[in-house]
Image (spheres, grey):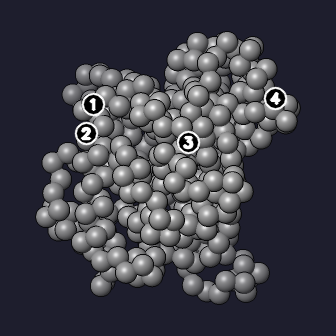
Amino acid sequence: MAEAYIAAVARSAGGRRGGRMAGWHPTDLAGAVMRGLVDHAGIDAALVEDVIMGCACPGGEQGANIGRYAALAAGFPETVPGTTVDRQCGSSQQALHFAAATVMAGLQDVVIAAGVESMTRVPMGLPWTLAAKHGFGTYRSPGLNARVGDEPFSQFTGAEKLAAQFGFDRETLDRFALDSHRKAAAATEAGHFAAEIVPLEIMLEDGTREMHDRDEGIRADSTLEKIGQVKTLTEGGVVTAANASQICDGAAAVLVCNEAGLKATGATPLARIHHMSVLGGDPIVMLDTPLAATERALARAGMAIGDIDLYEVNEAFAPVPLAWLHATGADPARLNVQGGAIALGHPLGASGAKLMATLVSALHRTGGRYGLQTMCEAGGMANVTIVERL
């Protein structure tokens, strides 16, 4: 079986809800990042044999198979097809797994795995809440309810349950959030994100135009006191908007090739995909599956957590990476070394490809060999990807 290589990575700088990226239609946003990807790699877009696009809310402006239309918006030849994957927050990480599996099987040689989410223009949950509002029902079927009961699937409830399970108090979560902002601010000032970000033109309120190339959500001046003033999401809880991921507009893309694809494109591989897996868990708690998924992934890869140089664990809520650290015994100094979604934003379906772009870039900057990426996903799932820097 052929190997799967990451030959290029790209992402947009994140935008706050209603912020600097709000003017970008998500199809054009994804297309611009994919165009930046192939331009950075210096390859002919006609060599791309498929686009696999992750999107957690594929409706409205993100509906009708955004993967195909983003490829057209990118200016790719009409011969480049596209499809859309929904594994909720893990959508573009799953897109990467599908792309890698395809080139490993030799069915195609050059595939783009990408993701997009404009949470300003397509609010979280819109496709199913709007359907229910107009009388088209809900995904909560009688059969599903018979299996899991009537308790709602709420990531916010899951975050509180996870914090309680591991005994994380409010200050612990807030300190983690502050650290995320500090690391992200330091990485931005040092230029560590420059190689992965595709600058995009935006229009300001006064009508002037400028390039958006810095993640908008980072609060460099944040303090523990400021974070501590934010109200909890539930009465008596510990989770707040300040120690959870930021709603974000963004897109990301990864160029995946096998040996034949590298030869055809002339691209230089950045990393080799060493392991891919996905696991299901408790759909009610929902957020703890990365713990078991990481344990199983390491066992299948014949590795120990100490073999991994850098970890990217999505900061959907502070209890998730903190619980992951506790369960795995991982070194906190290797976790989300340039900040995470609490500071940089979590553009749902784009986050898998976004984290991989950051992980591969960070491995090259630090000289680390192996990197591991995982994230919690609605329904109680988690993908795990281990890559080797080349």
Residue 246: x percent and y percent? 37, 54
Query: Element under label 4?
Result: loop
In the image, which is nearer the foreground, mark 4 or mark 1? 1
In what quadrant of the picture does the C terminus appear? top right
Between the C-alphas of marks 2 and 1, the distance is 6 Å
Between the C-alphas of marks 4 and 3, the distance is 26 Å
| Residue 340 in sight from this viewpoint | no
Is disc 2 surrounded by few (<14), some (14 to 19) or many (20+) residues within 10 Å? some
Is disc 3 surrounded by few (<14), some (14 to 19) or many (20+) residues within 10 Å? many
The residue carrying mark 2 is: 186
Q: Please name the residue shown 42% across and 25% down the image.
A: 195
Q: Please name the residue shown 73% across and 86% down the image.
A: 146
In the image, which is nearer the foreground, mark 1 or mark 3? 3
In what quadrant of the picture does the N terminus appear? top right
The residue carrying mark 1 is: 190
| Residue 171 in sight from this viewpoint | yes
The residue carrying mark 4 is: 108
Amino acid at the residue labelled 2: Ala
**Badges 2 and 1: C-beta atoms under 8 Å apart?**
yes
Query: Element under label 2?
Result: helix
Q: Please name the residue shown 51% across and 29% down the image.
A: 10
Nearer the observer, 350 or 71: 350
> Dividing the picture into quarters, in which one does residue 164 lie?
bottom left
In the image, which is nearer the foreground, mark 3 or mark 2? 3
Query: Element under label 1?
Result: loop
Amino acid at the residue labelled 1: Ala
Left or right, residue 169 beside residue 255: left
